[in-house]
Image: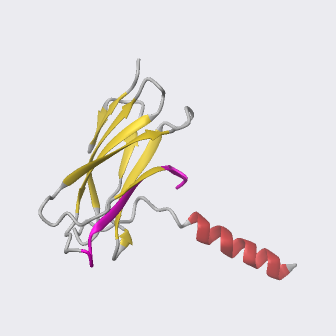
Amino acid sequence: MRLLLILSMFASSVFASKFDIDTYSTSIEFAQVTHVVATQRSSGNWCFDTSIRHNDQGWEHYADRWEVLDLAGNQLGYRSLGHPHDNEQPFTRSRCKIKIPAEISKVVVRAKCNKHGFGGKPIVVDLTISKGEGYLVSRKN
């Protein structure tokens, strides 16, 4: 029983520390989200136009994905990036039809590369205001 309690505490601390938006690198060796435009459509779904900067170096090291998460770290949507963008920096790619529950007012947009994973600066987007540091929001009326 004591072993079960210890394992439970260990698992809780591992999962609790898994999603950290305050610790990141600003090096462009890590994929950096530089700007986000979040637009709510008449359907209620969202489109995210996400700009990323990264020191892409061909297929061996490039930004390969960005994602939208709630503040608990649950993925709401993502966009895979199928090739390096060596000569296009920063670059912007979009993803629509992202469903965000009405009770969620803030989301995190973060990017990763195929060498270092996540670790660059994410942007926290407050969906209740029209703009903030690094983002713009447009809601349906």
The image shows residue 95 at horizontal and vertical percentages of: 37, 45
At 50% across and 62% down in the image, what residue appears? 19
Give the magenta range: 59-76
Is the residue 15 above or below the residue 123 in the image?
below
Q: Quadrant of residue 4?
A: bottom right
| Residue ranking furthest to the right | 1
Q: Residue at x 43, y 23 (%)?
A: 42
> In which image quadrant can residue 84 be found?
bottom left
- What residue do we see at 84% from left, 80% from top? 2
Q: Residue at 42% across / 35% down in the picture?
A: 46
Residue 66 is situated, as x and y percent measured from the top left of the image, at: 37, 56
Q: Is residue 114 left or right of residue 103?
A: left
Q: Locate the N terminus by quadrant.
A: bottom right
- Viewer-proximal residue among 23 and 109: 109
Q: Is residue 71 magenta?
A: yes
Q: Which quadrant holds residue 13?
A: bottom right
Is residue 68 visible to the viewer in this orientation of the structure? Answer: no
